[in-house]
Image: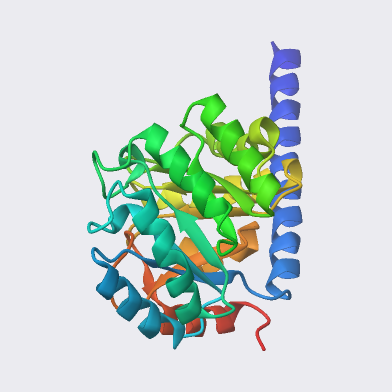
């Protein structure tokens, strides 16, 4: 009996020691990353008409974001019209100049604005045209699409020198730690993506802490950059501190709310200057 108690005590001690060592290692990694440049800041355009899109792009570019994402699924006047979308691209690029343009036609099941306007087959055709336009720097596609769809997106991105972002969005909760790591790794491991993205919705503060810790753990399994976001007001801290956990892009707003929990770009920059080494 005493031998069994000693064995259990030894196991508990070894477990606690390992956890402490991992925590120290992670804190050292946080300090290292805080001394590096902060994550890039992206702003999404989610306007419903072409004139509104151009006007919003003109306003946003004055804030000098690092990246501008066009959420094509939000635009109503060219919904389902591939030729109409492609015709907009050079005009939009002229407005934003040298800022990289990320192209996203989000599926409705993962937060897209259009329920019926962009079915999977039409979305794939649109992505192929966008990749070949010479205007788009990256294309964001959900890993919940069919495998054949994702492989085709990867192929067309490779052919045109466009980055392929494999993403997943959970608006109902935060997955278990192992699933968080798996989602981030899946983009590279299964589809050879150039970047992985995972956005989740916390139900409590523990979810936020656990998500950021899991995102930090995922870095050791990845050779590509990734984006890790805990959404909503509760998850807002992840948009500031995400870089400490390896996330290389964070999203902000300028005016219009484009996702739950976004900070204004000026507020985000101010907060990041307190955390990271900024010019």
- Establish if 9 lies above or below 124: above
Res 217 visible:
no
Residue 87 in percent (x, y) is at 41, 63
Between 189 and 138, the one lying in front of the other is 138
Residue 220 in percent (x, y) is at 75, 45
Residue 128 in percent (x, y) is at 53, 45
Quarter of the image for residue 266 reads bottom left
Res 11 visible:
yes
- Establish if 178 lies above or below 237: above
- Establish if 87 lies above or below 206: below
Between 139 and 231, the one lying in front of the other is 139
Identity of the residue drawn at 24% across and 41% down: 115
Identity of the residue drawn at 45% across and 36% down: 175
Q: Tally the marks.
A: 0
Residue 237 in percent (x, y) is at 45, 65
Between 204 and 94, the one lying in front of the other is 94
Identity of the residue drawn at 54% across and 49% down: 197
Query: Left or right: 212 with respect to 202?
Result: right
Quarter of the image for residue 147 reads top right
Instruction: Give the residue furthest to the top.
Output: 1
Q: Looking at the figure, which quarter contains the N terminus?
A: top right
């Amino acid at each position: 009996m005493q031998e069994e108690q000693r064995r259990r005590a030894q196991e508990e001690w070894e477990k606690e020691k390992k956890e402490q060592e991992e925590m120290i290692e992670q804190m050292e990694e946080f300090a290292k990353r805080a001394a590096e440049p902060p994550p890039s800041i992206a702003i999404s355009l989610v306007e419903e008409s072409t004139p509104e899109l151009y006007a919003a792009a003109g306003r946003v570019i004055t804030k000098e974001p690092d990246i501008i994402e066009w959420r094509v699924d939000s635009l109503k006047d060219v919904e389902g019209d591939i030729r109409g979308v492609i015709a907009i691209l050079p005009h939009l690029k002229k407005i934003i100049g040298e800022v990289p343009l990320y192209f996203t036609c989000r599926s409705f099941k993962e937060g897209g604005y259009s329920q019926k306007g962009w079915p999977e087959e039409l979305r794939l055709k649109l992505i192929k045209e966008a990749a070949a336009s010479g205007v788009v720097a990256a294309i964001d596609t959900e890993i919940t699409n069919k495998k054949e769809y994702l492989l085709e997106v990867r192929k067309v991105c490779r052919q045109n020198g466009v980055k392929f972002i494999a993403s997943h969005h959970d608006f109902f909760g935060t997955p278990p730690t192992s699933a968080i790591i798996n989602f981030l790794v899946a983009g590279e491991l299964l589809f050879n993506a150039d970047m992985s993205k995972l956005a989740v919705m916390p139900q409590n503060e523990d979810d936020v802490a656990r998500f950021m810790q899991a995102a930090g753990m995922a870095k050791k399994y990845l050779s590509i950059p990734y984006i890790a976001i805990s959404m909503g007001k509760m998850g807002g801290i992840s948009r500031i501190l995400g870089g400490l956990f390896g996330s290389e892009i964070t999203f902000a707003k300028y005016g219009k709310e484009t996702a739950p929990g976004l900070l204004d770009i000026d507020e985000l920059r101010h907060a990041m200057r307190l955390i990271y080494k900024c010019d």
